[in-house]
Image (cartoon, rainbow, N blue to C red):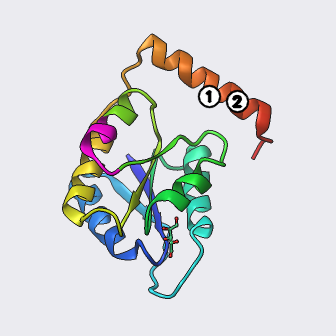
Amino acid sequence: MKIAIGADHAGVNLKQDIIAVIEQLGHEVVDLGCDCSTSVDYPDYALPVAEMVAKQEADRGVLICGTGIGMSIAANKVRGVRCALVHDLFSAKATREHNDTNVIALGERVIGPGLAQEIVRTWLSTDFSQGERHIGRLRKVELIEQTYHSTP
Ligand code: RB5
């Protein structure tokens, strides 16, 4: 898969650890920054990753900031993006099986690199369940999007 990744200044160290694990798994990484330790704004890095996924230029996206919260809020504003903030292995698996998430957000200030890498490994290797009830719920999410979002 092609995986787009982005981080703000508070996620830049974890970004390197996550790039390493994605490449170990044999996926292609598109690194959309940042590469700085000076303060930047997380929406500026969430948007290009979310857009790549929404336009199907990337299969999945990974976003990292201090908490993962700002990145997840910003990414979920882009139509077609289903971003989950994940800090445990159960949620990493469940959010693929149940929500078919195409973007994951992580907080470098919340969890360590070992757990974060394991979360990404699990999230990348888990398929959507294709369960009828989950498909139905995702259709309802799409309906909300269609009602309240304008086309990107
Ligand atoms: C940066 O200080 C911090 O606010 C940001 O990385 C993120 O945690 C926001 O949600």
Above or below, 130 against 2 in this view is above
Q: Is residue 17 magenta?
A: no
**Residue 88 highlighted magenta (yes or no):** yes
Amino acid residing under circle 1? Val
Q: Secondary structure at mark 1?
A: helix
Q: Residue at x 60, y 74 (%)?
A: 41
Q: Is residue 127 above or below residue 4?
A: above
- Mark 2 sits on what residue? 144
Would the CB of label 1 be found within 8 Å of ligand 1?
A: no
In the rendered image, the vertical position of residue 34 relative to residue 26, given as above or below: below
For image coordinates 62% across by 60% down, the residue present is: 47
The residues colored magenta run 87-93
Q: Residue at x 47, y 42 (%)?
A: 102
Q: Which residue is mark 1?
A: 141
Q: Residue furthest top?
A: 132
Kindly state the secondary structure of the residue where label 2 is placed.
helix
- Crowding near pointer 2: few (<14 within 10 Å), some, many (20+)? few
Query: In the rendering, at what x and y percent does residue 121 appear?
Result: 25, 48
In the figure, is residue 24 to the left or right of 92?
left
Q: Position of residue 37 (x, y in %)?
A: 44, 86
Along the line of sight, the residue nearer the viewer: 31 or 93:
93
- What kind of residue is marked 2? Ile
| Main SS category, magenta section | helix
Q: Which of the 4 quarters of the picture holds residue 123?
A: top left
| Dot 2 and dot 1 residues touching (CB under 8 Å) | yes
User: Where residue 142 sits in the image (x, y, percent)?
Assistant: 65, 28
